[in-house]
Amino acid sequence: MKKINIFYWVFTGLLIPTLGIGSVMDLMGSPKSVEIITSLGYPAYLSPFLGLLRILALIVIFVPKFPRLKEWAYAGLVIDVIGAIYSILMIHHSVLYIIFPTIILGFIFTSYFLWHKKNGA
């Protein structure tokens, strides 16, 4: 059980640099964030909104309570990242552009799986 708890916190902790930093940049409306989201065909005003939602999801995931809300937070992050992968593929970027989002998706799934494992669900 101790190993599961350690691995849970490692993979959940990896969500902060992989999603959190970019989300703060999105929320602040950084030019690079705007450039990325508009290159995918989305309006610039969507960037701060998605950044805020990702930050809120990460907060919920790190708070030890609210299991139902945590389920929704994980689901939202999965939808967000799968949407990003789909968008990248639809504008015919190189497949190399989906490597990082796919790794993030792996972190999310692993964190979710270990969260259920450590809580006996």
Image (tube, helix red, strand yellow):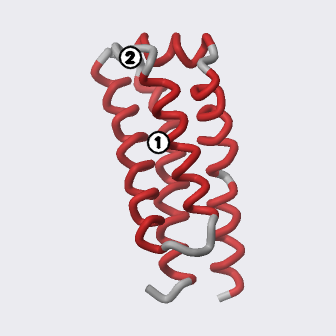
Q: Indicate the amino acid at tag 2.
A: Leu
What residue is drawn where x is 63% and y is 60%?
12
What residue is drawn where x is 71% and y is 85%?
2
Q: CA distance from mark 2 to mark 1?
A: 17 Å
Expressed as whole percent of the image width and height from the top left, the position of residue 103 reads 53, 45
Expressed as whole percent of the image width and height from the top left, the position of residue 59 reads 61, 55
Instruction: State which quarter of the image contains the C terminus.
Output: bottom left
Instruction: State which quarter of the image contains the N terminus.
Output: bottom right
What residue is drawn where x is 51% and y is 55%?
108
Looking at the rendered image, the disc whose residue lies closer to the viewer, 2 or 1, is 2
Expressed as whole percent of the image width and height from the top left, the position of residue 23 reads 59, 34
SS of the residue under disc 1: helix
Q: Is residue 29 left or right of residue 90?
A: right
78 relative to 7, above or below? above
Which badge, 2 or 1, comes first in the chain's sequence?
2
Q: Which mark is residue 102?
A: 1
Q: Indicate the amino acid at tag 1.
A: Thr
| CA neighbours of label 2 inside 10 A, class few (<14), some (14 to 19), many (20+) | some
Residue 118: which quarter of the image? bottom right
